[in-house]
Image: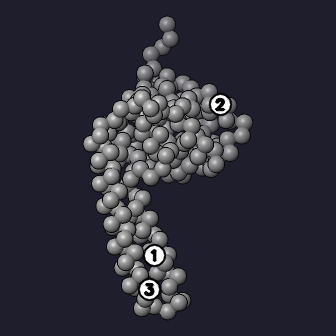
Amino acid sequence: MENFVIDTSVFTNPDIYTTFGERDQLGAIENFIHLAIHSGANFYMPSSAYEEMQKMVDLGRMSSEFEMVVRIRSPRKHSIMIPSEILYELIEEIRHRINKGLRIAEEHAKEAGKMTSEDLGKVINRLREKYREALRQGIIDSKEDVDVLLLAYELDGTVVTGDEGLRKWADKVGIKIIDPRNFRGILENLIKHKSPAK
């Protein structure tokens, strides 16, 4: 039986949740619940990711249905063993990104020194955007991401996320990933190919 570990982005990113045939999040979640119930698969979401999602989406009456279908469970952090090479690789990437961020900050500081106060705001905004991109894009940057990664590793599950960094690191660790825009189709195929009850 397939284990899917779902990230918040599946229900908060419009490019993903609209694939469930609805323009609003609650309609998409309702469609997901219907498909999930009939798919025969297991669905998990770490409690940290679920709390994050609840800050962005008011499930209201659907929270009990959602929790019936998606098991809210944290990874067993104290017993999971991951290869130390992954930690070294993460540290090396963080160091590289910090250095890149510093170079971006230095460039913008030099540029700002030559500007009027009116143009300074524009420089600061560009600095923030480039700095955020340099430090956060394509890397695991939250405890919610780490929890999704570790839970999928523990369960030998498939990560479902639109987060580029989480997808990249899941692949590095050897965790199965799927394109979240294909998630609905995968669930529909699971339903179609589910063997009839005996």
Q: Where does label 1 land, which residue?
A: 126
Label 1: how many Cα within 10 Å (few below 14, some 14–19, many 20+)? some
Label 3 sits on a secondary structure element that is helix
Disc on the earlier residue, 1 or 2:
2
Disc on the earlier residue, 3 or 2:
2
Q: Where does label 2 land, which residue?
A: 65
Disc on the earlier residue, 3 or 1:
3
Residue type beneath disc 3: Ala
Residue type beneath disc 2: Glu
Q: Position of residue 59 (x, y in %)?
A: 67, 41
Q: Where does label 3 land, which residue?
A: 112
Label 3: how many Cα within 10 Å (few below 14, some 14–19, many 20+)? some
The residue depicted at 47 percent of the width and 40 percent of the height is 147
Q: Position of residue 41 (x, y in %)?
A: 48, 25
Asked if residue 160 can be seen in this view, the reply is: no
Label 2 sits on a secondary structure element that is helix
Q: Indicate which label's residue lies in the foreground, 3 or 1.
A: 3
Give the CA separation, mark 3 to mark 1: 11 Å
4 shown above or below 9: above
Give the CA separation, mark 3 to mark 2: 53 Å
Asked if residue 170 can be seen in this view, the reply is: yes
Q: Is residue 15 left or right of residue 177?
A: right
Residue sitting at the far left: 85
Quarter of the figure with residue 3: top left
Residue sitting at the far top: 198
Q: Position of residue 107 (x, y in %)?
A: 36, 79
The residue depicted at 34 percent of the width and 73 percent of the height is 103
